[in-house]
Amino acid sequence: MHRRKLLETAIALGGSALVCTIAPAASARSTSRLFVIARSKNANLVSYDIRRKSDGSLDRADPLVAYWILAAEDNRRESLSWLERRLAYGYEVSDVSDNGFRLRLSAFERRPVRVERDADGAFRARTQIANRPAFLRRVFVDTDERGVLPSVNYVELHGRDATRSSPVSERLAP
């Protein structure tokens, strides 16, 4: 059975128990969107969110979460699979402090990302886009799905110029 169907079945069979089990942990933390990865395959997105503790500070033990937003279906949220975390959408976090951390994305390991807190307390993903310091908002991956495994045609990075606050984008070849 497909993993989404398994989840739906589990919720249907024991939804109230499941909610009771998860509710206390969920209330202790909140998230805010950092950026998303979109694909040419469908409208589904992978969202990368900052995790905060109940007092609003960065959850230094587990500062980032990535998950699917199934926009092509019913907009529900779904965890990434083990394979998705290991290959395409995975990440590594290092040098965590109250003001941010370093982020290495599996999707483009050669492009360093620094997540940092701005003057308003919001976190932003700073990287280079079109040779400019910029805040990453969206990654778009164009793929060719005809083979056994999809191949990447190009990747586009979209964000805001960190000094001029104007939109900036860059297309990367694989």
Image (cartoon, grey):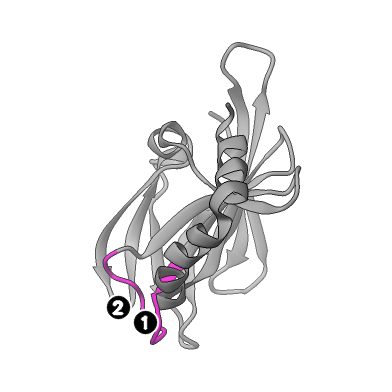
Q: Earlier in the sequence, mark 2 or mark 1?
A: 1
Q: Which mark is residue 98?
A: 2
CB under 8 Å between discs 2 and 1: yes
**Residue at (40%, 77%) from the top-left corner?**
28
**Residue at (56%, 17%) from the top-left corner?**
149
In the rendered image, which quarter is residue 117 located in? bottom left
| Crowding near the residue tagged with mark 1, few <14, some 14–19, many ≥20 C-alpha atoms within 10 Å | some
83 falls in the magenta region? no
Q: Which mark is residue 86?
A: none
Closer mark to the observer between disc 2 and disc 1: 1
The N terminus lies in which quarter of the figure? top right
Give the answer, above or below, for where 97 lies relative to 42: below
Q: Which amino acid lies under the numbered mark 1 shown in the image of this protein? A: Ser
Between residue 69 and residue 10, name the one nearer to us: 10
| Crowding near the residue tagged with mark 2, few <14, some 14–19, many ≥20 C-alpha atoms within 10 Å | few
**Residue at (71%, 32%) from the top-left corner?**
41
**Residue at (47%, 70%) from the top-left corner?**
23
Task: Provide the secondary structure element on which disc 1 rests.
Answer: loop
